[in-house]
Image (tube, grey):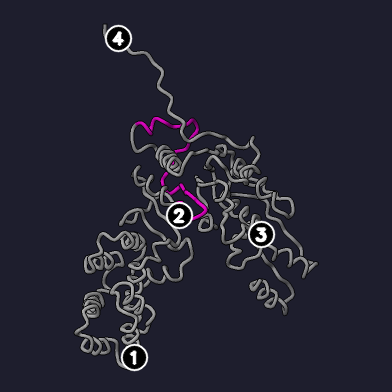
Amino acid sequence: PVQYQLVTQWSSGGSGLFVIGDPDQSIYGFRGSDARCFEKLLEDFPQTETVSLIQNYRSTSQILSCALPMISKNPGPTRLLEPQREDGMPVRAVTVSSALEEGIYVAKTINRMVGGLDMLDAQWMEGGETPRSFSDIAVLYRTHRQAEMLERCLKKEGIPYILSGKEDVLSLPVVRGTIGFFRFLLNSLDLLALQTALEQVWHCPADLIQAVCHKAMRNDSINAEAQWKLLEEEYKQVANLQSFFSSLHEFVPLLEKESPLSLLNRWGVHMSLEQDPGLDRLTHMAVFHPTIRSFIDTLLLGQEKDIQRAGAKKYVSGAVSLMTFHGAKGLEFPVTFLCGLEKGNVPLESAHYSADLEEERRLFYVGMTRAREELFLLCGTDPSPFLVDIPEEFLLVSKANRTRQPLEGKQLSFF
């Protein structure tokens, strides 16, 4: 609504107004977006001419035949899209009995798509399948917590992946304190970062933190190096702060010289945190950034798709993409898996708020239309009610625990 007011104010002195968008992809209601802005525009400017772009160059007719009936359950005009791509594979609806079985199915199917990482997988190809690269494939889910099992299964199969989006790991004390320390190194006036680091990493009491921050603020007229020499001398008997000052001496000279991955690896050794799982995940995020400043800025200001974590401490250009439906908006992939399509998850239900069914349906539509050529819909034994809105004749339904058929043949005799 605020954007709507801005646009109408900007155009008030002009002779025309042009807006473009898709109300069916309005999925950020929790940030204030409103799909009804287009309706309001037509009400406020009844002379407005509407031009509908109905030629779709992204998805095959099989994918659109499933997505359009589902989103058409929402109010609004008739949805029309004309696919411009050649026909492709049918949309596959796969039933799984558990999150583990879902993860195994996804990993094994990806293995098969890329030609198989072992000889047996290479043999198990379905007719008409196109060989894929890892970067052709996206695995999408409604909430970040669903990624844990998927990661375990991809790692087990040796499949490289990149996970996008802000994770709960960023709220862990060690991670918050580490980010705070490097934020403070980049800006010695960032006293909130200093407070976080002293509290979460060095476990200083509140009165000591307050005293240090107060004196740092009082001495901000002198340069940072001289300021911290004075404080170090004053608190030389405080063990926790001596460790902090030691870290300053260690990392300030390296800040502009080493990559964030190198700095975090060195930090882990310096603080005896080499085995900390939170710091390990943070280092896996750092591999995408050339400088510690760009890394910290992305963590603080980046959107879902900007924050990435590799499956290992080494960047791999060809990797499967893991992200939420929200994070995938604006992207497209030849092959897309939508996971966890079951009641209570899609639409997402919570004891704290009631689900906005129209927005949840739009979110599912966004997920489906990320797929260009192949779409897999994975659901449990209690499937999402949105799946009922997809005509059965457009789906190829199967179960994940399908076993390979034994090869038919006859044992040859040597005699």
- Residue 309 in the figure: left or right of residue 126: left
Q: CA distance from mark 1 to mark 2?
A: 43 Å
Front residue of 60 and 215: 215
The answer to whether residue 251 shows anywhere in this view is yes
Q: Which residue is mark 4?
A: 413
Q: CA distance from mark 1 to mark 4?
A: 91 Å
Q: Secondary structure at mark 3?
A: helix
Q: Is residue 283 above or below residue 364?
A: below
Q: Is residue 213 above or below residue 365?
A: below
Q: Of callouts 1 and 3, which one flags the residue occurring earlier in the amino acid sequence?
A: 3
- In x, y percent, where is residue 148? 41, 51
| Picture quadrant where residue 33 is located | bottom right
Q: Secondary structure at mark 4?
A: loop
- Asked whether 343 falls inside the magenta stretch, the response is no
Q: Of callouts 3 and 2, which one flags the residue occurring earlier in the amino acid sequence?
A: 3
Give the amino acid at mark 4.
Answer: Ser
Mark 1 or mark 4: which is in front?
1
Whether label 1 touches label 3, CB < 8 Å: no
Mark 1 or mark 2: which is in front?
2
Residue located farthest toward the right when viewing the structure as drawn: 47
Q: Secondary structure at mark 1?
A: loop
Q: Which residue is mark 3?
A: 23
The answer to whether residue 376 shows anywhere in this view is no
Give the amino acid at mark 2.
Answer: Arg
Front residue of 55 and 173: 173
| Picture quadrant where residue 117 is located | top left
- Residue 87 in the figure: left or right of residue 408: right
- Quadrant location of the C terminus in the rendered image: top left
Q: Which residue is mark 1?
A: 220
Numbered circle sitting on residue 145: 2
- Quadrant location of the N terminus in the rendered image: bottom right
Q: CA distance from mark 4 to mark 3?
A: 69 Å
